[in-house]
Amino acid sequence: MRFLLLFLMASPAWAQVTVQEYPVPKGHGIHDVWADAAPNGPVWFSAQGSGHLGILEPKSGKVEFVSLGRGSSPHGVVAAEDGAPWLTDGGQNAIVRVDPKTRAVKLWKLPEDSGYTNLNTAIFDRHGVHWFTGQSGIYGRLDPKSGEIKLFDAPKGRGPYGIHATPDGTVYYASLAGSYIGRVDAASGATTVIEPPTRRQGARRVWSDSRGNVWVAEWNSGNLSRYEPASGKWSTWRAPGDEPRVYAVYVDPADKVWVSEWTAQAMLRFDPQTEKFETFRSSSRTANVRQIHGRRGEVWTPESAADKLVVYRYK
C-alpha cells in the first residue's frame, strides 16, 4: 500500500486530510465506486472492462471479483438499504444485484424491445425503488419487490447520466447531451426539465446535500453549480485552473462538496460557506476519477486510468 499525507493549513475550518491508495489488478477497467455505510465496511466498484463487481476490504487491502455474466459491462454501482450492491450493466442491458454474503448474482433484463440503452447510473428512492439512467435517451425504475421494470423516454432524447435522490426521496438526474437536470415525479415517472443558467453546460452528475439542494457537475463549462428547489435559485462556481472539466460530484455528511476535475487530474473540495476550493492532486499523471462516494470521515474515488481506488480521510 502507498500512503500520502496532505495537510490543509489555509483555514482552521479545514481538517487534516490523509490519502491512501489501493492498487487494483490491471485489466478490469474500474469505473464507479460505492462505500458501505459501516466503518471499515467493504467498498464496491464496477469493473466495466472485465464484467465484474469488485470488492475491496480496506483493512487488509484484499480485492475480490464477482463475475456478473457473459457480456457484462457494468457502469454504475449503488448499495441498497440492506447493503447489497446493485449495478447498471450496459453489456447485458440489465440491472444486477449481488448478494453481499453469498455473492449470488441476480439479473433483471430490460424489455427486449428497449434496444441498447447504454445503462449508466442508479439510485434508490426512500421507498426502495431503484431508478436508473441510460445515455441512449431513457430512464427507468425497477421495483425490487415485484420485479416490475418501467422505462421512460427522456426529454430531449439521449444524454441521461448521473442520478441521485434528495433526503425527502425526490429523484433528480443529469443529462450530459441534453444539458439539463430532470426532476422525476415518482407517481407518474414524468420528468420536469430544469435548465441550468449556463447554456450547453453538459450537466454530467448530480448529488443532493442534506438540505435537498442539488449540486451539479458541469462537464462542458467546467462549473460546479447548485440548484435550490425551494426557491428555484441557481448558484455557479467555476472550478480552478485553465479549461476545467468537472466530471463527478459528491456531498459529504458535513455538506462539503467534492468534485473530480479532469484537466488538472485533481480532486477538489468546495466549502459552500467560504466559497473556496481546495485541491488534491493525484499521484498519477492520469487518474480519470469517475463516480465519487463516501461515508463519515471518508471520501472514496476510483482512478479508472490508474487502476487504483483512493480514499481521502478527514476529521
Image (cartoon, rainbow, N blue to C red):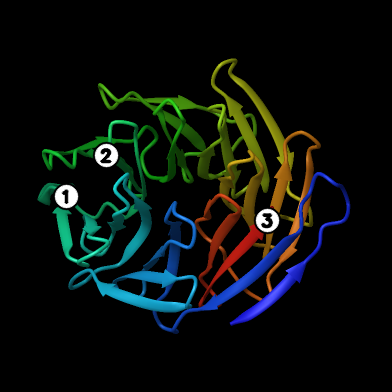
Q: In this figure, which residue is indicated by the disc labeled 3?
A: 314
The amino acid beneath tag 2 is Gly
Q: Residues within 10 Å of mark 3 (few under 14, many from 20)?
A: some
Does residue 78 appear left or right of residue 264 in this picture?
left
Q: Residue at x 78, y 57 (%)?
A: 242
**Residue at the farthest top position:** 231
Q: Residues within 10 Å of mark 2 (few under 14, many from 20)?
A: some
Does residue 33 appear left or right of residue 269 in this picture?
left
Q: Are marks 2 and 1 in contact (CB under 8 Å)?
A: yes
Q: In this figure, which residue is indicated by the disc labeled 1?
A: 110
Check disc 2 and report its element: helix, strand or loop: strand
Q: Are marks 1 and 3 in contact (CB under 8 Å)?
A: no
Counting residues from the N terminus, which is met first, the one under dot 2 or under dot 1? 1
Which quarter shows the N terminus?
A: bottom right
Q: Is residue 137 visible?
A: yes
Q: Residue at x 87, y 56 (%)?
A: 9
Q: Which mark is residue 225?
A: none
The amino acid beneath tag 1 is Leu
Q: Residue 106: x and y, percent?
A: 15, 59
